[in-house]
C-alpha cells in the first residue's frame, strides 16, 4: 500500500477533477437537430446568465415547453473538452469552476469568449477596446469576476420613476427588486478565518438563503486584505457594514458567486440548471446561433411565429415554431443584434445592412453605457495572491486558497470626489451642457425619440446620482498579480452613451460596438478624480506600509492634463455594458415596456442586462438575477394568472399550438445517446487515471 501512496496522491487532483463533470452530466436537457421538437411555447435566444436562469424558472411550470438556443458549447460538462485538456494541463471545467483561475488560467480569448473589440474610440486614444463576453451555457456569468453587488435603492427607484407612466411600474422599485434579488440568493456568512484576516461585516437581514445563486466570501483571504478597511477609514471613506440593503456608499468586502460546499464558481448553469430533475418540457440546444426571429405582421403588431437558427455561417438554416413567446437573452451586445437581424431596429441601420425593416424601432442598440476602469499600481512588499500561488507553498493548491478572488470594494459619491462646492459647480455645468450633447455626437443617433431618452438618462444621472450619496466611482483592491497591488477606479454613471449596430445581415459577423468612451467631459473628470483618490488611498497607512514605489501610471503623472492623457489611453471596460434594449417609454427610444415586451410586438420580450435603462453603481449579475426572478413572475402571471393577478386574462391573444408533439420521445432519445457517451467517458476516465 505504502508504495502507492505518493503516485496516488499525485493523481488525486486529477482524479477529483475528472470525477466531478461526470456526476454533473445531466444529459436529459440537451437536444440536437434530430431530437428537437417542431415547436415550443417559449423559445429563448441565448442561454446566458439571464436566458438560462429564466429557462429554469419558466419550465418549473410543466404546462410550458421551453427551448433554449445557445451559440456556445455546454461548457465544463463536456466529456470531450475535459479529456482534451487533461493531457496537457487541467480540464477546462477546472479553469471555469475555480475562482482563482479567473486570473491564473483566464478564459479570455478561449472558445468561451466572443472576444469582441469596440470600434476605434476617438476620445480614448483612438483605441479598439477589448470586450470579452461569455459564449457558453451560463454566458458571461461563466467567465466573469464573480462580484455580487446590488445597486443603491436610489438608483432602482430612479429606474421606477423613468417608467412610472406605465401601469404596475412598482415592480421595478427598490422594494420589489430587493425582494427578488434575495429570492435568487443562497447566502453563507464568511468563514472565521476570512473574518479574522479581512474583518468583513454583514447583516443577515439583507440576505436571502432560499435561492440558488451562492453568495459568500472566499474561504481564505490573502493577508494583504487586512489593510483595506482600516486604510479606507484612515483616508476618510466611511465603512459600510451592510452594503446589500440599499445603501452602498462606503467601503466593504463584496460577496462573490462562490459555492462554499466545494469552493467553486456559482454561475447560471450550476445555480439554475444542473440541480434540476429531468424535465421533458425543457430543451437546450447548444453550438447553435439564432439568426432571426420570423414575424407575421398584423394590425395589432408583429407576432413572432418562428425562430431561425444555424450552426455556422455555411450551415443550413433551420427553424422552430413559437407557441407563445420569443425571449431574447443574448446580452447587451447580441440582443440588439438579434432584433436588428430580425428587422426590428433603426430603419437606417437595417437598410445599410441589407435587412428589410419589419418595425422601425429607433432605440434598438442605442443608449449603450459601460463602466470604464483603470488602476494605480504599486510594487508590493508583501506577498500578493500571485506570489503565494507561484510559491508552491503548502496552501497554494488547496481549494480554500484557490477560492480567493479580489473583493475589496468602495463606492464614493460626488462630494467625496469633488468636494461640496466642486460637486455643485460641476453639476451646474453638466446641466448647461445637456442640449449640446444630446445630438448626433452625444447619442449615436439623430432620432428625436432616442435623443429624448438620452436626455432622460442624462438628467436622472445628474439630478439623482451627482447630487446624492450614490457612488460615482467604484474603487477595487486588486491583489492577484505577483509583486504588484492596485487600487482600481471605475466610473459608474457615465454621461457618454453609445450604440451597438449591425453592418451585415449575418449573425456570424460581430455587431459594431461603439460605447463612445469619454465623449462627455464629465466622465474624464470623474475618472481622473477617482484615480487620484485611488493613489491617495494607496499612499495612506496601513496600506502604504505594505507598498513600494508606484509603477503605473508612475510619478511622472501629476497634473490634471497628465492624468487625462493617461486615462484616455489606458481606461478599459469593467465589463458592464447595459441599456442597449432599454426599458424606457417608447417616445424616449425605449425598446421594452415595463413587462419587458418589445414595443410593437405581441410576443417578444428581452430579458438580460440590456434592459437596464442606465448603468448602476454595482456589478451587473446581482441585479440581473433579481430581474430574471421578476420576469418569471410577470410571464407566469400573463399566462396563468393567480388570484393575486391583475385581471385574470393573458395580456395577449397568442394561441399555443401545443407544439410539443415529439417532445417526450426526443428527450428520451437524447438521454440514450448521451448515456452511451457517459459510459465511454467512464472507460476513458479509468484509462486516464491509470496512465
Ligand atoms: C470578463 C467579465 C467580467 C465580469 N465581471 C463581473 C463581476 O465580477 N460581477 C458581475 O456581477 N458582473 C460581471 N460581469 C458582467 C456580467 O457577467 C454580465 O453583465 C452578465 O453576465 C450579462 O448577462 P446577460 O444574460 O445579459 O448576457 P450573457 O450572460 O453574456 O449571455 C448572453 C448569452 O447569449 C448567447 N448568445 C448571444 N447571441 C446569440 C445568438 N444569436 N444565438 C444564440 N445564443 C446567443 C451568448 O453566447 C451568451 O451565452 C463581467 C463580465 C465579463 C465579460
Ligand atoms: C459543487 O457542489 C455543488 C453542490 O453544492 C454541485 O452541484 C457542483 O456540481 C459542484 N461543483 C463542482 C465543480 O464540483
Ligand atoms: C396547467 O394547466 C392546467 C389545465 O389548464 C391547470 O389546471 C394547471 O393549474 C396548470 N398548472 C400550472 C402550474 O399553471
Ligand atoms: C460544440 O462544438 C465544439 C467545437 O466544434 C465541439 O467540440 C463540441 O463537441 C460541440 N458540443 C456539442 C454538445 O455538440
Ligand atoms: C399570419 O396572420 C394571419 C392573419 O393576420 C393568419 O391568417 C396566418 O395564419 C398567420 N400566419 C402564421 C404563420 O401564424
Ligand atoms: C503549512 O505550513 C506551515 C508551516 O510552514 C504550517 O504552519 C501550516 O499548518 C501548513 N498548512 C497546511 C494547510 O498544511
Ligand atoms: C458647457 O457649459 C459651459 C457653461 O456652463 C460652457 O462654457 C461650455 O461651453 C459647455 N460645453 C459644451 C460642450 O456644451
Ligand atoms: C430632470 O429630473 C428632475 C428630477 O428628477 C425632474 O424634476 C425634471 O423634470 C427633469 N427634467 C427633465 C428635462 O427631464
Ligand atoms: C458622500 O459620502 C460621504 C462619506 O460617506 C458622506 O459624508 C456624504 O454625506 C455623502 N454625500 C451625499 C450628498 O450624500
Image (cartoon, grey):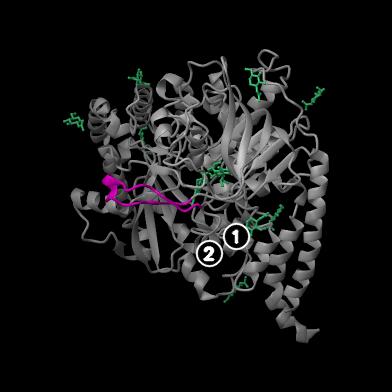
* Residue depicted at 71% across the width and 77% down the height: 9
> In terms of depth relative to the viewer, which is nearer, 545 or 377?
377
* Residue depicted at 79% across the width and 43% down the height: 666
Residue range in magenta is 114-132
Q: Position of residue 624 (x, y in %)?
A: 55, 37
Viewer can see residue 671? yes
Viewer can see residue 204? no
Q: Position of residue 614 (x, y in %)?
A: 43, 32
Lateral position of residue 271 relative to residue 607, left or right:
right
**Residue that numbered label 1 is attached to:** 98
Lateral position of residue 26 relative to residue 358, left or right:
right
Q: What kind of element bears circle 2?
A: loop
- Dot 2 alpha-carbon crowd within 10 angstroms: few under 14, some 14 to 19, many 20 or more: some
**Residue that numbered label 2 is attached to:** 105
- Dot 1 alpha-carbon crowd within 10 angstroms: few under 14, some 14 to 19, many 20 or more: many
> In terms of depth relative to the viewer, which is nearer, 114 or 673?
673
- Image quadrant for the C terminus? bottom right
Amino acid at each position: 500500500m505504502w508504495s502507492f501512496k505518493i503516485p496516488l496522491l499525485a493523481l488525486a487532483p486529477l482524479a477529483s477533477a475528472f470525477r466531478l463533470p461526470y456526476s454533473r452530466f445531466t444529459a436529459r436537457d440537451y437536444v440536437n437537430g434530430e431530437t428537437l421538437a417542431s415547436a415550443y411555447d417559449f423559445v429563448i435566444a441565448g442561454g446566458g446568465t439571464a436566458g438560462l436562469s429564466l429557462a429554469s424558472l419558466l419550465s418549473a411550470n410543466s404546462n410550458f415547453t421551453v427551448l433554449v438556443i445557445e451559440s456556445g458549447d455546454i461548457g465544463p460538462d463536456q466529456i470531450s473538452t475535459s479529456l482534451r485538456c487533461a493531457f496537457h494541463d487541467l480540464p477546462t471545467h477546472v479553469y471555469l469552476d475555480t475562482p482563482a483561475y479567473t486570473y491564473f488560467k483566464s478564459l479570455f480569448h478561449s472558445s468561451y469568449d466572443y472576444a469582441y473589440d469596440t470600434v476605434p474610440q476617438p476620445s480614448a486614444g483612438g483605441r479598439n477596446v477589448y470586450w470579452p463576453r461569455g459564449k457558453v451555457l451560463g454566458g458571461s456569468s461563466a467567465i466573469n469576476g464573480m462580484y455580487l453587488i446590488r445597486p443603491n435603492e436610489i438608483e432602482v427607484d430612479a429606474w421606477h420613476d423613468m417608467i412610472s407612466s406605465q401601469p404596475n411600474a412598482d415592480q421595478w422599485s427598490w422594494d420589489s427588486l430587493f425582494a427578488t434579488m434575495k429570492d435568487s440568493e443562497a447566502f453563507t456568512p464568511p468563514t472565521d478565518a476570512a473574518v479574522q484576516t479581512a474583518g468583513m461585516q454583514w447583516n443577515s437581514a439583507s440576505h436571502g438563503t432560499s435561492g440558488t445563486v451562492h453568495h459568500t466570501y472566499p474561504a481564505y483571504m490573502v493577508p494583504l486584505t487586512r489593510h483595506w478597511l482600516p486604510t479606507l477609514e484612515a483616508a476618510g471613506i466611511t465603512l459600510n457594514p451592510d452594503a446589500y440593503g440599499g445603501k452602498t456608499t462606503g467601503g466593504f468586502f463584496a460577496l462573490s458567486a462562490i459555492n462554499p460546499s466545494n469552493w467553486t464558481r456559482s454561475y447560471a448553469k450550476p445555480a439554475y440548471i444542473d440541480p434540476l430533475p429531468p424535465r421533458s418540457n425543457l430543451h437546450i440546444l447548444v453550438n447553435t446561433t439564432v439568426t432571426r426571429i420570423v414575424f407575421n405582421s398584423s394590425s395589432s403588431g408583429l407576432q413572432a411565429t418562428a425562430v431561425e437558427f444555424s450552426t455556422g455561417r455555411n450551415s443550413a438554416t433551420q427553424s422552430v415554431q413559437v407557441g407563445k413567446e420569443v425571449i431574447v437573452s443574448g446580452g447587451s451586445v447580441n440582443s440588439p443584434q438579434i432584433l436588428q437581424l430580425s428587422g426590428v431596429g433603426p430603419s437606417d441601420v437595417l437598410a445599410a445592412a441589407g435587412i428589410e425593416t419589419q418595425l422601425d424601432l429607433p432605440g434598438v442598440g442605442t443608449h449603450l453605457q459601460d463602466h470604464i476602469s483603470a488602476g494605480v499600481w504599486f510594487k508590493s512588499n508583501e506577498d500578493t495572491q500571485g506570489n503565494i500561488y507561484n510559491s508552491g507553498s503548502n496552501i497554494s493548491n488547496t481549494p480554500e486558497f484557490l477560492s480567493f478572488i479580489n473583493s475589496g470594494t468602495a463606492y464614493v459619491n460626488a462630494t467625496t470626489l469633488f468636494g461640496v462646492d466642486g460637486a455643485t459647480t460641476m453639476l451646474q455645468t453638466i446641466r448647461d451642457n445637456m442640449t449640446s450633447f444630446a445630438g448626433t455626437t452625444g447619442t449615436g443617433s439623430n432620432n428625436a425619440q432616442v435623443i429624448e431618452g438620452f436626455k432622460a438618462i442624462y438628467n436622472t444621472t445628474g439630478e439623482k446620482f451627482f447630487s446624492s450619496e450614490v457612488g460615482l466611482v467604484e474603487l477595487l483592491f486588486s491583489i492577484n498579480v505577483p509583486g504588484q497591488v492596485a487600487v482600481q477606479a471605475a466610473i459608474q454613471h457615465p454621461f457618454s452613451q453609445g450604440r451597438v449596430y449591425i453592418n451585415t445581415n449575418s449573425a456570424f459577423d460581430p455587431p459594431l460596438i461603439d460605447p463612445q468612451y469619454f465623449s462627455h467631459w464629465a466622465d474624464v473628470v470623474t475618472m481622473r478624480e477617482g484615480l487620484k483618490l485611488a493613489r491617495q488611498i494607496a499612499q495612506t497607512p496601513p496600506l502604504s506600509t505594505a507598498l513600494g514605489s508606484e509603477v503605473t501610471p508612475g510619478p511622472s503623472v501629476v497634473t490634471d492634463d497628465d492624468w487625462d492623457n493617461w486615462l484616455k489611453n489606458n481606461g478599459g471596460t469593467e465589463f458592464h455594458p447595459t441599456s442597449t434594449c432599454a426599458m424606457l417609454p417608447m417616445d424616449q427610444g425605449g425598446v421594452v415596456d415595463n413587462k419587458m415586451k418589445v414595443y410593437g410586438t405581441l410576443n417578444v420580450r428581452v430579458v438580460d442586462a440590456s434592459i437596464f435603462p442606465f448603468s448602476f453603481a454595482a456589478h451587473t449579475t446581482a441585479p440581473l438575477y433579481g430581474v430574471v426572478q421578476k420576469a418569471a413572475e410577470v410571464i407566469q402571471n400573463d399566462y396563468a394568472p393567480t388570484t393575486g393577478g391583475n385581471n385574470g386574462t393573458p395580456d395577449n391573444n397568442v394561441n399555443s399550438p401545443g407544439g410539443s408533439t415529439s417532445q417526450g420521445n426526443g428527450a428520451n432519445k437524447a438521454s440514450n445517446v448521451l448515456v452511451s457517451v457517459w459510459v465511454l467517458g467512464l472507460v476513458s476516465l479509468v484509462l486516464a487515471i491509470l496512465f
